[in-house]
Image (cartoon, coloured by chain):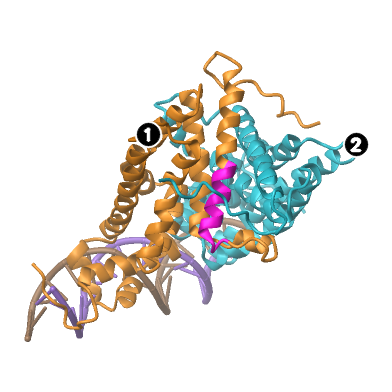
Chain colours: A cyan, B orange, C brown, D purple
Amino acid sequence: MLQPAANAERRDAADAILDAAEAVFADHGFAAATTRAIADLAKVNLALIHYYFRTKEQLFEAVFVRRSDEINDRRRGILAELFSGDSEPALEQILVALLRPTIEVGRMSNGGGFHYARMVVNVASGHDERSTRLTGMQYNGIAREFIDAIQKVVPGISREMAVWSYMHAINIAMPLMARNHRAAVLSDGLCRDDDLDAVIDNAVTFIAAGIRALAISHAVDEAGRLRSGNNSTPA
Amino acid sequence: MLQPAANAERRDAADAILDAAEAVFADHGFAAATTRAIADLAKVNLALIHYYFRTKEQLFEAVFVRRSDEINDRRRGILAELFSGDSEPALEQILVALLRPTIEVGRMSNGGGFHYARMVVNVASGHDERSTRLTGMQYNGIAREFIDAIQKVVPGISREMAVWSYMHAINIAMPLMARNHRAAVLSDGLCRDDDLDAVIDNAVTFIAAGIRALAISHAVDEAGRLRSGNNSTPA
DNA sequence: GTCTATAGTTCGATAGAC
DNA sequence: GTCTATCGAACTATAGAC
């Protein structure tokens, strides 16, 4: 079951390909990434990519699934622990369970997790068939678990607002994980996105306040649709 | 200066190319988009693309600049009006000035603005040289104007938190404009992202609450760095 | 399992006629 | 300005030797 590579300091060729693909896909996206660049970075022969993964498409999917399974397993573990006690967890704890596993995986896997975060941002922003399929396949289930959790700990929040809360939380968090350094540029270095613990703490404060505001704003009308707000006509 | 096309119901070839390119780039991203698909959609000869725009790269840039200039002009107009009166505008009005012009442009230009919103999401999530350059060139200036405005209307908020506030606001808003229908999927149709007025109203409520929470959380310590929060250790 | 060599496409861009 | 035709350069994927 375990056959040592010719070079002792290298893992299996398949693993080397997965890691290299993660980096190349993250930097260039699916279309602009080339199997040659992946083979070069992995230091394996080009034909091996197709021997192990058949097509570029299936390689991409393998990379995506590997890391998302790891992250979602951690999320489920934390969620289960939070709800196993006698008292109800705080909303902030739910959000930490949503955000932290991504950066923890990023720290562990030799930077591969950070590459993955950029991949996810690309996939989540894509509207092609592959992006939609992978997002749904790997994240619809865990998304509904977090939406359920939000409804449990935020009194009176509607399902509709809980779903929007999850969407806003994810849309804030994923670009932070990908660390595009834009906050640093806009603040002339004042904001640092490499201290992810501080960044997440900040984001959790922001998101929790937003969610509670949604719960209140929507609770005042019984209709189950978005309230007709009074802040959309500026002048 | 104005030469009518052979087909009277069609505008200039260059405009037709720009519109078609906007749609194709939005659907497939820069790399996966082909000049042939753009030429077909625009119903012009392939060679005309290179005649008018020289390269695929410069065509992409022209599409991006055209619409972002239009949106940012509107934003500046609203901002100027808000700060021209005697009383200080509300934070919610600043946020509406940030979010609404994108959807207004989307409504006007035969759906082109919605294609552009997807382009922006792709560019903003990219880490390649082109994405970084275009984002900085078209959006760094307007970003700083909104960060300034946030600091003016939110008492005691630090520059650092104002920058993060802008980042969170944009990261929430852009995916909404792109309308990926994910909220609808996760809510089994309960959330609708095609009613952008309601979506924006919802987002403004969420973002304003988040910003005020950031201002408070950061105000309690004088150090100018992120406070060390107490919500990052779940169990 | 790993390699070389290459088939088979597709793409961006241009030359040159009209 | 608009067209046809095509070049040359990439790419994915495979065949087949070892």
Residue designated by label 2: A85
Percent position (x, y) of residue B70? 30, 53
Q: Quadrant of residue A95?
A: top right
Q: Is residue B196 magenta?
A: yes
Q: CA distance from mark 2 to mark 1?
A: 46 Å
Residue A7 horizontal side relative to residue B39, left or right = right
| Res. A50 in view | no
Residue designated by label 1: B144
Residue B99 horizontal side relative to residue B66, left or right = right
- Residue A213 vs B221, above or below: the answer is below
Residue at 60% in and 51% down = A18
- Residue B46 vs A187, above or below: the answer is below
Viewer-side label of 2, 1? 1
Residue A57 horizontal side relative to residue B65, left or right = right
Q: Main secondary structure of the magenta part?
A: helix
The foreground one among A79 and A92 is: A92
Q: Amino acid at mark 2?
A: Gly
Q: Is residue B90 magenta?
A: no
Residue range (magenta): B193-206
Secondary structure under the numbered disc 2 in the rendered image: loop
Quarter of the image where the N terminus of chain A is located: bottom right
Q: Residues within 10 Å of mark 1 (few under 14, many from 20)?
A: some
The foreground one among B225 and A135 is: B225
